[in-house]
Amino acid sequence: MSKHLNLDKILEDFSNEIGGKVIPYTDSQSIIIMPTSHGRFQRVLGYTRISKSQKVKFLEFDSKVCEFSDSIDMKKYLTEAAHHTFSRIIIKDGFLQIASSVIVEHATADLIKDMVKEVAEVADELEFQITGKDEN
């Protein structure tokens, strides 16, 4: 893929395929509201950033699971994370989140779709396991 990545277009096409919705946030950020396999919806934030150490442009996706607390069985969820293809578990801004990233030059529309789908599905499943609710 070229260095100029039209994330909004890729996400818009994908959301049309799956019945989701894209909300452009800024020039470098978009949100996609994804239907999940459990009949719920999950928000995924997509954005670009430059790595500090390598000066490489990344495409990042993340989705909130719930507010982080010490009562969450992190060992259980980190063990389960070994089975994810793209996703990793992070704590960001006080929230447990599911995230995925790719170097922009390596990103294709199909890869982006697969990453967004996995981030949404895993975040939705964890959110429901931990909170029993659909908030994010």
Image: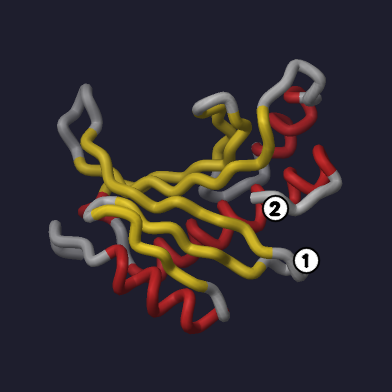
Residue at the image position 74 percent from the left and 44 percent from the top: 126
62 up-or-down from 41: above or below: above
Q: Are marks 1 and 2 in contact (CB under 8 Å)?
A: yes
Q: Helix, strand or loop at disc 2?
A: helix
Residue at the image position 45 percent from the left and 51 percent from the top: 45
Q: Which label belongs to residue 38?
A: 1
- Percent x, y of residue 44: 51, 54
Depth check, front residue: 24 or 50: 24
21 up-or-down from 44: above or below: below
Residue at the image position 72 percent from the left and 68 percent from the top: 37
Q: Quadrant of residue 7?
A: bottom left
From the image, which quarter does the N terminus lie in? bottom left
Along the polypeptide, which appears first: circle 1 or circle 2? 1
- Percent x, y of residue 15: 48, 75
| Residue labelled with disc 2 | 124
Left or right of 135? Residue 71 is: right
Left or right of 65? Residue 20 is: left
105 up-or-down from 39: above or below: above
Q: Which label belongs to residue 46?
A: none
Mark 1 neighbour density, 10 Å: few (under 14) some (14–19) many (20 or more) = few
Looking at the picture, the colour scheme in use is secondary structure
- Residue type at tag 1: His
Q: Quadrant of residue 23?
A: bottom left
**Farthest residue, direction top:** 70
- Residue type at tag 2: Asp
- Percent x, y of residue 100: 47, 45
